[in-house]
Amino acid sequence: MNSTNTNTAEQEVIDSVRRAREEEVRFFSCAAKPERERWVVHEFLMRLGLKFFDRELNSEVGDSPVDVTFRSARFQIKEISDPAQRRHAEIKESLQRAQKATTVRDLVGPVTARDIVLADVSKLLFQIAATFKYSPRVKSDLDLLVYVTRPHAGFNEPHRVAANKLKSLGWRSISCLFGEKPLLLVATSYSPPFLCPTDQNPNQAMQRTAGRSDA
């Protein structure tokens, strides 16, 4: 391959990275928060094996405690993220590098050493769910969905033990998207059927299958 072809191929890579990082900046902006929340619910429902249409996911506006509605579900979305990460600032910095890059090597940023801190997801879930921001009446009509993006995080106890600690906190249901794994932790008799843990609802498999046909 001659130098002209090499330069062209390298420029295509740089242009592709620029477009990707521009999209990252947009996606993680404040303005795109409703879109991110719908994406979380979309991924969660996909991992549950539900069939649905994107138009069934709707963002709430104003001061509503509900972030996303899906059929009878009223999701409030929370994230367990890395407290040491400056996500939006770091993404903007990576975009600036891409915009200035003249070679592929210029796209790579500095490597920063960080201490590895193991996080207990059970404890962090409890802290989020124990909020006093909403009254018991409001929480009893909300489905809390927590997604975990924090690295080096895990459950220090079985999911069922963690779920038992969450039951008294008043939410209609509590679920977690842990990586690619959806966890149904807490449900009440008023929860949407597809959010009920199987040990609380012996007909859950049948209900999820039925959910595939009505989407």
Image (cartoon, rainbow, N blue to C red):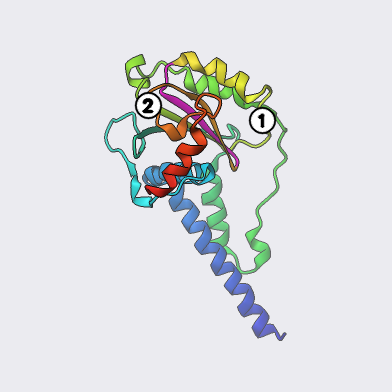
Q: Is residue 99 above or below residue 155?
A: below
For residue 156, side relative to residue 142 (left or right): right
Decide if residue 124 is in sight here. Answer: yes
For residue 89, side relative to residue 103 (left or right): left
**Image quadrant assignment for residue 199:** top right
Q: Is residue 110 above or below residue 191?
A: below
In what element is the residue under mark 2?
loop
For disc 2, the neighbor class at 10 Å (few under 14, some 14 to 19, many from 20) is many
Could you tell me the amino acid type at mark 1?
Answer: Gly
Q: Where is mark 1, residue-wise?
A: 154
In what element is the residue under mark 1?
strand
Q: Position of residue 73 (x, y in %)?
A: 37, 34
N-terminal label among 2 and 1: 2
Decide if residue 36 is in sight here. Answer: no
The quarter of the image holding the N terminus is bottom right
2 vs 1, front mark: 2
Report the magenta residues as a range: 170-179
Could you tell me the amino acid type at mark 2?
Answer: Leu
Q: Where is mark 2, residue-wise?
A: 142
Which residue is located at x 68 percent, y 63 percent? Answer: 105
Q: Position of residue 134 (x, y in %)?
A: 36, 19
Nearest the camera: 83 or 169? 169
**Image quadrant assignment for residue 80:** top right
Q: Give the distance between the C-alpha atoms of the residues marked 2 and 1, in whole angstroms.
A: 25 Å
Q: Main secondary structure of the magenta part?
A: strand
Q: Is residue 16 above or below residue 82?
A: below
